Amino acid sequence: MDTSPAALDTLVVGAGISGLATAFGLARRGHAVEVLDAGSKPGGVIGSVRHEGALYETGPNSALDTTPLIGELIAAAGVGAERLAASASADTRFVVKNGRPVALPMSLGAFLATPLFSPLAKARLALEPFIPRQPADREEVIAHFVRRRLGREFLDYAIEPFVAGIYAGDPERLSVPAAFPKLHALEQRYGSLLVGAVLGARQRRKRAETAKNTAKSFSFRGGMQVLTDALARGVGRVTLEARVVSVSRLSDGSFLVVYDKDGETLTRHARSVVLAVPAGEAARLAYPLAPEATLALQEIEYPPVTVVATAYHREDVTHPLDGFGFLAPRVEHRAVLGTLFSSSMFDGRAPEGQVLLTSFVGGRRNPELALAEDATIFGKIAAEHRSLLGVRAPALWNALTRWPRAIPQYGPGHLDRIAHVANAERAVPGLRFCANYRGGVSAGDCIASAHATAESLGAWLKAPVTA
């Protein structure tokens, strides 16, 4: 048992990408850090599994290179040589329309020719620069925002499937300023998304950032877990299968963390604590310290998502699989949210003569299916693959991963909830919250948030102690 006060500079609860990247950043700044996690491996939802000669992911299949912070973290973790760029074909993304995958247009010429949108919808886009902006303080859901500025077809066949792919969410229940702050900023600053996209690109170049719609995807030769494993090694002290029971603050301002491991109840003392766990768990642990933040965190919803990796003989799939994958809009009434062409995206994902697909079911659109029996899910996915990809033989194998609480939903009022979290950090010196319910849900967003957390907490740890 650790009985010395403030034996650690920082105790991080949670070994997902947010917690590991925060701990890694603090360790590189010379601070004594330990990570506790209830799981059996570091990485949280990130997991790479080898099976019958294939390599599949249990969570994110790739990341987008949107900020230099990502490359800096990869280099510092020592896995730059393992980084793997997505294939050129991965720039092509499909959206299902009228029962078949249609390539999403990526140029003006392709947009004018695509059957994805009607001539009327394309003409409607020309009106976008003339549509008045909403008042800055009026919170709008993404569905209303897109219908108002771009029209119904763009909501149905571009934004709704995109939202389902990122958040497993419903655009009728996601806040524009919270979930898509850059869209909100474009309208407020330029009065137009089209004008803002052009002028905003100049600002991104100055910040060395890349828009998510143009950023390149990447992974690692051994899968996304290569990064989280490397971060865990860099931190050094990562204690797994350790369930944190409570976090309390002592009279000297340090923190006492109580956790269970291997049937024992143990403690750690630290000058600061980072809660890098999902909102519900953060609410439970933060309650004695910040009850208002706890109530706000409890309101954040997480719909279930089930991920299924499927292998086929290449000759049994008639679709060329020449892209990133497909998204299925709600209006098409498909069982899947989408399917990634995993073996087309990255080399080494399937044995010679085979293909690997990764499909997602559930989310806000169909939570019951995510919780159905394995056989039911496998049957639904097989039917979708037959219909949409021309699969003409049974799968060689399926591998299923369930996430009963998958992705936080940035619904109306989310920014107010996060404001309570920020207030708690100011009211309780040394306490930080860093997870994907704050600052974005993608791996790149989590890395950026972790960098900011490590910077601010590192500065606080080095600041002179005042009476």
Image (cartoon, grey):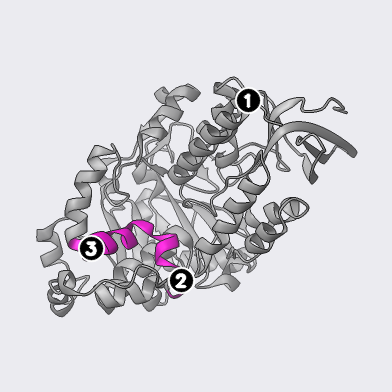
Q: Amino acid at mark 3?
A: Leu
Q: Residue 201 location, x and y as percent?
A: 21, 48
Instruction: Say how many tags the image has.
Output: 3
Q: Left or right: where does residue 330 sit relative to residue 424? A: left
Camera-nearest label, 3 or 1 = 1
Tell me where residue 171 sits by quadrant.
bottom left
Q: Residue 24 location, x and y as percent?
A: 57, 28
Instruction: Say above or below: 250 vs 404.
Output: above
The residue at the point 37 percent across, 74 percent down is: 143
Camera-nearest label, 3 or 2 = 3
Instruction: Say above or below: 328 vs 455.
Output: below
How far apart are the alpha carbons under marks 1 and 2?
47 Å
The answer to whether any part of residue 390 appears in the image is: no
List the residue tagged with mark 1: 464
List the residue tagged with mark 2: 170
Sequence-earlier tag: 1 or 2: 2
Are dots 1 and 2 in contact, CB under 8 Å? no
Are dots 3 and 1 in contact, CB under 8 Å? no
User: Which of 181/337 is in front?
Assistant: 181
Q: Which mark is residue 37?
A: none
Q: What residue range appears in magenta? A: 172-194
235 magenta-colored:
no
List the residue tagged with mark 3: 193
